[in-house]
Image (cartoon, helix red, strand yellow):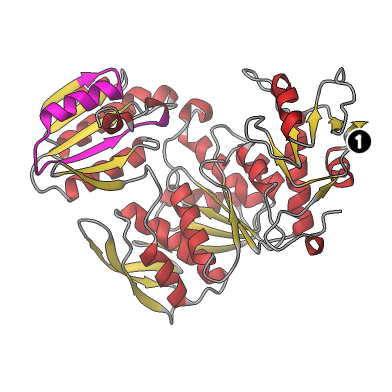
């Protein structure tokens, strides 16, 4: 069995052969190692003592790298029965290696028993997860999924890294098709669920925004407490229709909420507002991250902090010291030009919010460098036309459109506009156009590689 008491403080709980077989119902091919210090799916990064899971997908097969993994690690889980015994290594056969990874993660989660907070929604998931983790870390040892390991592979892999002295787990959950949030909840079994918002995203997989909502709300079938955005009326309608029987904690700015913000002052960078955690607890906070949308993320995190009885001063200090997440609304100065780099991803809602922030902080000219918003399905053309119209309404001076979809937005823009194919081309053009005093927004879907707008020219 997993034994937290017999591991060193801070070390991962050791997984025994019995744990693995119990979790996966696998068949032993050879047994030469009786326990493992971790799970790996990457033969390049596997460490001594770890167990390699040979995942197989439509475009990859981990079994191809099995020999490399076994040279470094201590064993493997495979789905090819033809693999024979290996000296000094343990090999376990299962019918489906992905399901085995998920089953191991589920087993570890139930055995270790820490409370889990899950975060989902169309926008703000990663920032909210990081904020929650920062607040909880003032009084607890917190484990979280790193980077964007939020899907059916990344989330269970994150869970296998639970350490013996972890006290709370915070997990971001992403989805691009119906049923995926349910799958993640079945693996992680969260007690608390944060729902940030519902907006058009990944419509190629969902089909319509109603299906997006239904998928995000799959979380309600598992969690006993839901922390929800009271100002997202479409989401709140869905919660009401779901007949959710658990506890609901609302956060917001406009509508009645348990955790709310008032007296909001938006600065050139960051903001200040009164944070009301309860009827009797209010405090002034001065976050460094910008935008109204980030105030919602802060409120969601503060609500979770109140559930876990985090001291109000600790909540304030965590909020005030949080500096943001890389590649998400990062502010920088270059040659006297202010740049907002929001290049991690883009959908219609997040693009609109970033553009509004660009317009709000303008001093002289403002320039929008936008790459295609992807995975929007039949909503693709309409979404890009709306963005083009918004850019005109906000008074953007120069619009650089990157990609064939954003060229649709360019056709709706009434101003100085350029259409290009790549981020590198946009970067070269931008350097010929900008001048001291300009403010520039750079944003686009992840695969558009919009970070190259700046990187390729430096």
Q: Give the side of residue 433 with respect to residue 269, left or right.
A: left
> Which quarter of the picture shows residue 377?
top left
Quadrant for the C terminus, please.
top left
Residue 60 against residue 244 in the figure, above or below:
above
Residue at image coords 60%, 64%: 141
What is the x, y in percent for residue 39?
72, 41
- Front-most of residues 230 and 129: 129
Q: State the residue position of label 1.
A: 31
Does the rendering let one see residue 122? Answer: yes
368 or 32, which lies in front?
A: 32
At 79% from the left edge and 37% from the top edge, which residue is drawn?
Answer: 74
Camera sees residue 409: no
Say if 434 sits above or below 16 in the image: above
Residue 333 placement (x, y as % from top left) = 20, 46
128 horizontally vs 433: left or right: right
Residue lying at 43% horizontally and 82% vertically, measured from the top left: 280
The span picked out in magenta is 419-446
Q: Quick check: 345 above or below 114?
A: above
Is residue 343 shown left or right of residue 45?
A: left
Residue 214 locus on image (x, y percent): 56, 41
**Residue furthest to the bottom:** 280
Residue 75 counted in the magenta span: no
- Relative vertical location of residue 83 with respect to residue 360 in this rendering, above or below: above
């Amino acid at each position: 069995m997993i034994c937290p008491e017999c591991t060193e403080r801070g070390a991962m709980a050791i997984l025994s052969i019995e744990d693995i077989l119990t979790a996966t119902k696998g068949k032993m091919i050879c047994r030469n190692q009786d326990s493992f210090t971790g799970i790996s799916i990457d033969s390049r990064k596997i460490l001594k003592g770890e167990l390699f899971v040979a995942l197989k997908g439509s475009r990859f097969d981990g079994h191809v790298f099995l020999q490399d993994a076994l040279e470094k690690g201590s064993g493997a889980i495979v789905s090819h029965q033809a693999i024979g015994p290996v000296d000094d290594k343990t090999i376990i056969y299962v019918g489906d290696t992905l399901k085995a990874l998920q089953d191991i993660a589920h087993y570890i989660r139930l055995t270790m028993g820490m409370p889990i907070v899950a975060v989902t929604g169309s926008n703000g998931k990663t920032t909210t997860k990081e904020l929650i983790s920062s607040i909880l870390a003032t009084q607890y040892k917190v484990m979280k999924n790193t980077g964007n390991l939020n899907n059916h592979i990344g989330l269970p892999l994150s869970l296998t890294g639970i350490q013996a002295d972890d006290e709370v787990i915070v997990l971001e959950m992403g989805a691009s098709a119906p049923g995926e949030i349910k799958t993640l909840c079945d693996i992680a079994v969260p007690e608390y669920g944060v729902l940030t918002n519902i907006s058009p995203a990944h419509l190629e997989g969902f089909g319509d925004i109603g299906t997006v909502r239904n998928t995000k709300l799959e979380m309600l079938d598992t969690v006993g407490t839901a922390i929800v955005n009271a100002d997202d009326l479409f989401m709140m309608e869905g919660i009401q229709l779901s007949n959710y029987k658990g506890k609901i904690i609302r956060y917001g700015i406009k509508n009645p909420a348990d955790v709310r913000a008032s007296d909001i002052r938006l600065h050139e960078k960051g903001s200040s507002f009164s944070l009301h955690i309860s009827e009797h607890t209010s405090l002034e906070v001065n976050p460094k991250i910008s935008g109204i949308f980030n105030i919602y993320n802060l409120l969601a995190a503060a609500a979770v902090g109140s559930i876990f009885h985090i001291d109000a001063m600790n909540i304030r200090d965590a909020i005030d010291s949080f500096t943001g997440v890389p590649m998400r609304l990062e502010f920088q100065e270059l040659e006297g030009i202010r740049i907002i780099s929001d290049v991690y991803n883009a959908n219609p809602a997040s693009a609109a919010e970033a553009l509004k922030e660009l317009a709000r902080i303008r001093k002289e000219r403002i320039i929008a460098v936008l790459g295609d918003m992807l995975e929007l399905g039949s909503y693709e053309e309409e979404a890009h036309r709306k963005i083009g119209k918004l850019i005109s309404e906000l008074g953007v001076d120069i619009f650089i459109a990157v990609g064939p979809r954003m060229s649709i937005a360019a056709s709706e823009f009434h101003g100085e506009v350029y259409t290009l194919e790549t981020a590198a081309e946009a970067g070269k053009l931008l350097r010929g156009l900008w001048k001291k005093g300009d403010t520039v927004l750079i944003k686009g879907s992840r695969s558009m590689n919009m970070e190259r707008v700046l990187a390729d020219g430096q």
